[in-house]
Image (spheres, rainbow, N blue to C red):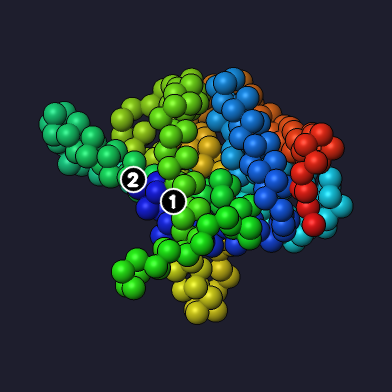
């Protein structure tokens, strides 16, 4: 529910940024990019690696640009690549801050263990809802961004009171798709992050989810970006960042506070390799699908 709400209410900003990377102008081309991103993420997910749909769709769009000879907006690409570095770092810093504050607060409160457990469960539910909203708001661009310029839907007028735009219809469909993906294929990835990378207490898990949610929301919020601009401050780019990078960054941040010995760095290295290889794999799959559609099925993949 919250994934869908986030996608519909706050998903426009990141979608616009991703659209500037490469203007896919034919429906079969957009289909190819999405399938390439989906296949590459599926392969990595089956291996239990928490890879990024952001990296996959960026790789797929660049693959479309290379195949069609279309220019890639280097400025936008550099901005996106920069957030891939900043995202886990910011998430780690936020997690470390909250871990220190919350740990001190809990130690001073001296709650009974049952009361602490009840509070922690409630906090996890609230953080999970916020995380789902932020995920929908930030990552809907990865799912439906390439379809926005060529949306097959038309605006729907509801009782002459509310207009359900074609973009919002795409976001609704994409939000449902994200939710289905979470229910069906996310278990192995969740176990890798929540168990294999670092053993976490329920309180630490809450901090990880909260930190991840804040980072995703910051990079998706047009309101915050507009406020910073109105104050003549540097605005935060509205860029689809990696939820997996944010989570892993938060986990490692907490692990470093504990001395770093509990972090399984071999798992972290394996995850990092997946981050670097995924865009390349997605680009190659995108090019292959475009070739098949154009030369075997006679589809127009670009104009």
Percent x, y of residue 209: 39, 40
Q: Residue at x 61, y 35 (%)?
A: 38
Q: Nearer the viewer, residue 10 or 23?
A: 23
Total numbered circles: 2
The circle on residue 183 is: none
Q: Give the vertical position of 252 relative to 78 (above or below).
A: above
Callout 2 crowding tier (Cα within 10 Å): few <14, some 14–19, many ≥20: few
Viewport quadrant of the C terminus: bottom right
Helix, strand or loop for disc 1: helix
Judged from this view, the residue extending furthest toward the front is 298
Q: Nearer the viewer, residue 252 or 215?
A: 215
Q: Is residue 213 visible?
A: no
Which image quadrant is residue 242 in?
top right
Q: Residue placed at 31% from the left, 30% from the top?
A: 202
Q: In x, y percent, where is residue 34? A: 64, 41
Neighbor class of circle 1 (other Cα within 10 Å; few <14, some 14-19, many 20+) is many
Contact flag, marks 2 and 1 (Cβ < 8 Å) = no
Give the residue at mark 2.
Answer: 1
Give the CA distance from mark 2 to mark 1.
10 Å
Relative to 146, say whether 225 is above or below.
below
Residue closer to the observer: 282 or 258: 282
The spot of residue 1 in percent (x, y) is 33, 45
Residue 84 drawn at (x, y percent):
63, 46
- Report whether residue 278 is seen: yes
Residue in the image at 84% along x and 50% along y: 68
Residue drawn at the location 72% of the way across and 47% of the way down: 29
Quadrant of the rendered image containing residue 113 = top left
Which residue matches tag 1?
Answer: 172
> In the drawing, does residue 292 fall left or right of residue 52?
right
Q: Identify the mark nearer the N-term, 2 or 1.
A: 2
Mark 2: which secondary structure? loop
């Amino acid at each position: 529910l919250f994934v869908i709400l986030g996608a519909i209410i706050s998903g426009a900003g990141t979608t616009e940024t991703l659209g500037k990377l490469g203007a896919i102008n034919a429906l079969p081309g957009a289909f190819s990019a999405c399938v390439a991103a989906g296949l590459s993420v599926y392969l990595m997910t089956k291996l239990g690696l928490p890879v990024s749909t952001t990296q996959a769709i960026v790789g797929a769009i660049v693959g479309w640009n290379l195949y069609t000879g279309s220019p890639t907006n280097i400025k936008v690409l550099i901005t996106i690549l920069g957030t891939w570095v900043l995202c886990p770092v910011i998430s780690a810093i936020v997690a470390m801050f909250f871990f220190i504050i919350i740990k001190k607060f809990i130690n001073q409160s001296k709650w009974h263990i049952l009361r602490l457990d009840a509070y922690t469960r409630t906090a996890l539910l609230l953080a999970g809802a916020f995380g789902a909203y932020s995920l929908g708001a930030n990552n809907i661009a990865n799912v439906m961004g390439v379809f926005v310029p060529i949306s097959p839907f038309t605006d729907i007028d509801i009782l002459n009171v509310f207009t359900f735009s074609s973009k919002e219809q795409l976001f609704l469909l994409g939000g449902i798709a994200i939710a289905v993906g979470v229910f069906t294929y996310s278990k192995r990835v969740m176990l890798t992050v929540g168990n294999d990378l670092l053993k976490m207490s329920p309180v630490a898990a809450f901090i990880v989810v909260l930190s991840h949610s804040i980072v995703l929301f910051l990079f998706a919020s047009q309101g915050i970006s507009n406020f910073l601009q109105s104050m003549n401050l540097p605005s935060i780019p509205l860029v689809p960042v990696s939820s997996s990078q944010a989570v892993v960054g938060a986990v490692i941040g907490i692990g470093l506070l504990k001395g770093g010995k509990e972090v399984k760095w071999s798992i972290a290295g394996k995850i990092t390799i997946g981050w670097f290889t995924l865009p390349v794999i997605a680009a190659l799959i995108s090019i292959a699908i475009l070739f098949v559609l154009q030369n075997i099925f006679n589809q127009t993949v670009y104009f």
